[in-house]
Image (cartoon, rainbow, N blue to C red):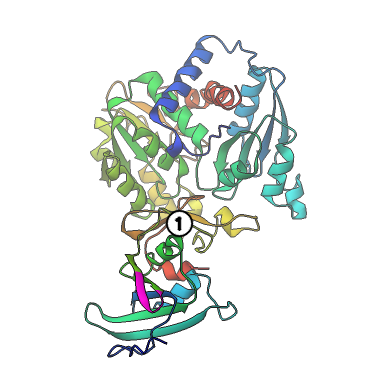
Amino acid sequence: MSGKEPEDGLLISPIQDGTVIDHITGGEALVVLRILGITGTTKEAISVATNVGSRISGKKDIVKISNRELSKEEVDRIALIAPNATINIIRDFRVFEKMKVEIPESVTGFVCCPNPGCITNSNEPVESGFKTKKGGRLQCIYCDTIISDNIVDYII
Amino acid sequence: MHHIISIKELEVEDINRLLDKARLIQEKGFKRRTLEGKLVALLFFEPSTRTRMSFSAALSRLGGDVITVDSVEGSSISKGETLADTIRVVSSYVDAIVLRHPKEGAARLAANFSTVPVINAGDGAGQHPSQTLLDLYTIRENMPLDNIDVGLLGDLRYGRTSHSLSYALSNYNVRIHTIAPKSLEMPAVIIEEMAERGVELIQHDSLADVINELDVLYVTRIQRERFPDSASYARVAHSYRITPEVLKDVKDNLILMHPLPRAGEIDPAVDKLPYAKYFRQAENGVPVRMAMLEEVML
C-alpha cells in the first residue's frame, strides 16, 4: 500500500492499478458499466459512487475499475451519456494518463434501434450500428432513424 | 463490389453518369446485349408491380435472365430462414440481386452478406434509389436541374419517394417547397439535413400559395390508413386533388409527376394536359434500371 489517505469527501478508496471514470452525469454510473459490458459476472473489482457532490456539476458519479485499463474506444462510448466524463488511467496509485471522453464517429452493438421496422430488430444475425451526429445524436446506419434523446433507454 | 443501396450514398457524379447512361440507352432504342449470360435474382418480399416488372424488362433488354421470388410465402423465409442466409445462398447462384423487402435497412444487411452486387428496390418506408433516379431523370428530361422550384405534395412524413428525392435534389441548385397536411409534414430530421446541405426548403400550408411558382410538382399518395377516420382523410385528400382548374395559372413548363399508384390525387382529366408526366416517369423506369444493372455488373 502507498499509505496515501483518501481525499476529503471521497467515498471510495484509491485504487492501485486500473481506470477511474470521474464526472459521470449524476445517476448514470450503472449505465456506464452496462455500456462497458461490465456486469456482476465479469471479473473486475468495481467501486461505484453515485450522486456525490461536485463543485462543477452539483452531483456526479464515479466508477473505479481495478486491474483493467480501458481502451480509448471503450471510454469514448461513455461520451454518449456522460459527455463531461474524465478518464484516469491509474498505475501504482498515480494518475498515469488523464483524458476526456470524445463522442465516437460510430457505435456498434450496444444500442438498439427504436424503429420496430428496422431490420436490426428482426431475427437476423446482425448487430445494430449507428453513426453519431451533431449534439451526440445517433442515426441508425440501416434505417436512418435518429435517436435524439434518452439514449439510455435504447442501450441493450 | 458495387452496391446501390441509398441515394444518399451516391455522389452527384455517380448520379449524373447513371442518368447520362439511361438517356443514351433510351436514345439508342434499347438495342443492347451488354449483360448477355448474366443472371439476376429479383427477390421481392413485398408486393410491387412497376418496380419488379421494369427491372425484369430492363434485364431482358440487356440480354440477361432473371430468377424471381415474389412473395414471402413463396420463399424459405416462410420456414424461418433469415434474410442473411437467403442472401448468402442466392448470391452464389447469380451475378446480382435486386431486393424489395418490408424491413427498413434490409438492402444494407443484404449487401453485408452478399457476394454479388445488391440493388435496393425499396426497403419498407426506407430507401428506393431506383425510383429516385427515374424521378430525377424525368425532371432532367424536361429542364436543367438548375435554378428550379420543385414542389413536393402529399404524404411527406411517411412517403419514402419524397424523402429520397429531397436528398437527390440537394446535389443540385433547386428550391424545394413542401406542401402537406400538418400531420404529414416532412420529418424534422430531413428538413434539418436539407439545411445542412445548403438547400433552400420552404414549407407551405396551401398548394395555391405556391403552385404558380413551381417548375415541378411531385404529387404523392396520401395514405388513408394514416388518418384516424375516413372523414378527416377525405377532407385532406380532397384539398390536394389536382384538377385542370388547379393548374390553370401555372408556369407553361410545369411538369406534374407522381410515383404511382395514384389514388384520386390527380384527376384523370389532367392526363391529357401537357403538364402530365407521370406515365412517362413510369416508362423511364426501364432505361434507368438498365443503367443501374450495367453500373453494378459491368
Viewer-closest of A40 and B193: A40
**Quarter of the figure that contains the N terminus of chain B:** top right
Residue B80 in magenta? no
Residue A92 in magenta? yes
Viewer can see residue B89? yes
**Quarter of the figure that contains the C terminus of chain B:** top right
Question: Height in image: B103 above or below B152?
Answer: below
Residue A90: image x %, image y %?
Answer: 39, 74
Chain containing mark 1: B
Crowd band around label 1 with a 10 angstrom C-alpha radius: few (<14), some (14–19), many (20+): some
Query: Image quarter for residue A8?
Result: bottom left
Residue extent of the magenta highlight: A91-96
Residue B15: image x %, image y %?
Answer: 43, 27
Q: Secondary structure at mark 1?
A: loop
Determine whether, in the image, residue B171 is placed left or right of residue A114: left
Query: Image quarter for residue B167?
Result: top left
Determine whether, in the image, residue B280 is placed left or right of residue B256: right
Residue B259: image x %, image y %?
Answer: 48, 34
Residue at image location 38% in from the left, 74% down from the top: A21
| Amino acid marked by disc 1 | Phe
Instruction: Kindly identify which residue carries mark 1.
Output: B227
Residue at image location 22% in from the left, 81% down from the top: A55
